[in-house]
């Protein structure tokens, strides 16, 4: 756990709980480790990589028949 290897820690604590079912400390640490592991996995799943798109106004083609608002070319 100290090295952020929660997947391995969950497996280890699960094994300890199987070998020593009466060990309350091991069960508590297993539950805490499992909770932290699930939270980190969930955070990885919802992580979004932000991509910025650069738009150049000069590259946008406006048809001559367009009658809506226009940007001044002086800006």
Image (cartoon, rainbow, N blue to C red):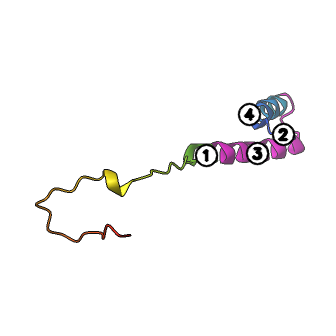
Query: To which residue does mark 2 refer?
Result: 1
Q: Secondary structure at mark 1?
A: helix
Marked residue nearer the N-terminal end (2 or 1): 2
The Cα–Cα distance between marks 1 and 3, rounded to whole angstroms, is 16 Å
Dot 1 crowding, Cα within 10 Å, few <14, some 14–19, many 20+: few
Marked residue nearer the N-terminal end (1 or 3): 3
Is the C-beta separation of discs 2 and 1 under 8 Å? no
Q: Quadrant of residue 8?
A: top right
Q: Secondary structure at mark 2?
A: loop
Foreground pick, 10 / 42: 42
Marked residue nearer the N-terminal end (2 or 4): 2
Q: Is residue 51 left or right of residue 67?
A: right
Foreground pick, 63 / 29: 63
Residue 31: image tag: 3
| SS majority, magenta | helix
The Cα–Cα distance between marks 2 and 4, rounded to whole angstroms, is 9 Å
Give coordinates of residue 45: x percent, y percent: 57, 43
Mark 3 or mark 4, whichever is nearer to me: 4
| Position of the C terminus by quadrant | bottom left
Q: Is residue 4 left or right of residue 54?
A: right
Query: To which residue does mark 1 refer?
Result: 42
Give coordinates of residue 50: x percent, y percent: 53, 50
The Cα–Cα distance between marks 3 and 2, rounded to whole angstroms, is 13 Å
Query: To which residue does mark 4 refer?
Result: 7
| Position of the N terminus by quadrant | top right
The Cα–Cα distance between marks 2 and 1, rounded to whole angstroms, is 17 Å
Residue at 81% from the left image edge and 34% from the top image edge:
13
Magenta segment: 19-41
């Amino acid at each position: 756990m100290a090295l952020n290897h929660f997947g391995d820690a969950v497996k280890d604590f699960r094994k300890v709980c199987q070998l020593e079912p009466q060990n309350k400390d091991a069960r508590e640490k297993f539950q805490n480790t499992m909770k932290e592991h699930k939270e980190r996995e969930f955070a990885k799943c919802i992580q979004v990589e932000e991509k910025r798109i650069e738009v150049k106004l000069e590259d946008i083609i406006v048809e001559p028949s367009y009658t809506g608002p226009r940007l001044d070319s002086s800006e």
